[in-house]
Amino acid sequence: MKSVAVLPGDGIGPEVVSAVLPVLDRMGLPLEFRFGEVGWTSWCETGNAVPQSTWDLLAETDTCLLGAITSKPLREAEAELAEHLRGTGLRYVSPVVQLRQKLSLYANVRPVADVHADRFAFSVIRENTEGLYAGLDFHGLGPALWDVVKDHPNAAATGPELTSATLRLQTQFGIDRLLRFGFEHARQNGYRLLSLADKPNVLRESSNHLRGRLELISQEYPEIETEILNVDALALWMVRRPERFGVIVAENMFGDILSDLGAGVMGGLGLAPSGNIGEHGSYFEPVHGSAPSMAGRQKANPMALFLTASQLLRHLDLPAPAEQIRSAVRAVARARRAVTYDLGGTATTPVAAAAVEKALSGT
Ligand code: NAI
Ligand code: MG
């Protein structure tokens, strides 16, 4: 029996969780679901976006299913935040950032599949901890950084005070574990091609390093073909020929962009699942956020959460129910049943979830 922490979160998160969880429950999976609090609502109520009870829950469970959270408060909410700040001096730190950092979840996995026609299926794996988002971002440069950039003509014309710089951090530790993760993912899911998104003709030194590690590690996976593509070309191909891809691996920023593009290629945020995985922990969440303007209206598409649950089940080594859920979502999508507003229909969240449950039982 495995256990899953369920964190519904904010906005449409609780709505899709209350539609999907009962369906999972009735499948009779060998799983125990335990609920916890996370997010903006939790922060407003307790002054803590991830309360200690949730950290305890995460330590006691095998993985986590998250609905959606408000990671950056909207304007009205920010006023409320300021109110809080006066009282507590605390700042709201996005819970997903906290989870990724504390649990060192270095790989963000986004399966991208054509649920309507089965034309393509691939995964985008984004590095989560370094690259251009390592946090080494400076405005107004001190002497050490200025010494590095001062010969650039634009910098020379501007001066250190009005120049910004961001370092793209690439460590061999980070590169190797990401590449190995990508190859293992390809092996486990039967993909024959691993494409590395980079920009070798511009970022020569760091790209050379990456190429060297790819060449070395790929020898451990002789059945998987590899290629290095310029990130811009890769984006074009993802739209034009998504069927050519298997696993796409990318540093943090390239991966951020490509993974959202993947959600678009799939048909939108209402369909896109994701997982964040590390050596000792993981959590799974739909790609979408809390969609505050839509919250409370039971209009959100629950398919992204169903597909996220399917990804979670595969991670817990339960491939049969994972495949059942995936097939049910595809059957509903293909029959154009229970279509929510984002895909041009009028079905509500519970109606869409009920259609998946019906497809699950094969009736
Ligand atoms: P969002 O993903 O919440 O919504 C963007 C658009 O997609 C909206 O038009 C929404 O109506 C639509 N949409 C999203 N999910 C949908 C679904 N299941 N069914 C139908 N339509 C759906 O992104 P937005 O509005 O930029 O952010 C809202 C809040 O969510 C912010 O606080 C943001 O920081 C947070 N957020 C959190 C993420 C995370 O937890 N990883 C990811 C993205 C946003
Ligand atoms: Mg993003």
Image (tube, rainbow, N blue to C red):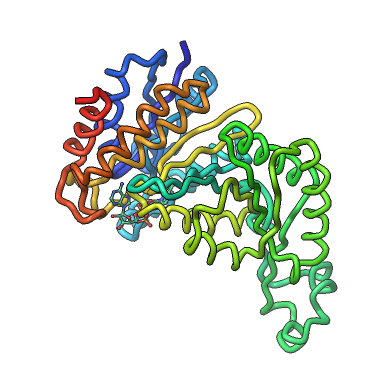
Task: State the image coordinates of residue 195 (x, y, percent, origin top left).
Answer: 65, 52
**Residue at image coords 47%, 15%:** 2
In the displayed structure image, the side of residue 333 where residue 252 appears, left or right:
right
**Residue at image coords 69%, 65%:** 166
Q: Residue furthest bottom?
A: 157
Relative to 232, say whether 190 is above or below: above
Point out the image quarter for the C terminus: top left
**Residue at image coords 69%, 69%:** 165
Task: State the image coordinates of residue 66 (x, y, percent, origin top left).
Answer: 41, 35
The answer to which of 248 and 116 lies nearer the viewer is 116
Task: State the image coordinates of residue 347 (x, y, percent, origin top left).
Answer: 16, 45
Count the marks: 0
Relative to 280, say whether 140 is above or below: below
In the displayed structure image, the side of residue 66 where residue 276 appears, left or right:
right
Task: Write down the quadrant of residue 280 in the picture.
Answer: top right
Task: Write down the quadrant of residue 30 in the picture.
Answer: top left
Task: Write down the quadrant of residue 342 in the picture.
Answer: bottom left
Question: Could you tell me if residue 243 is visible in this image?
Answer: yes
Task: State the image coordinates of residue 28 (x, y, percent, origin top left).
Answer: 33, 14
The answer to which of 180 and 360 lies nearer the viewer is 360
**Residue at image coords 35%, 46%:** 271
In the displayed structure image, the side of residue 90 where residue 165 appears, left or right:
right
Q: Residue furthest top?
A: 1
Question: Could you tell me if residue 89 is visible in this image?
Answer: no
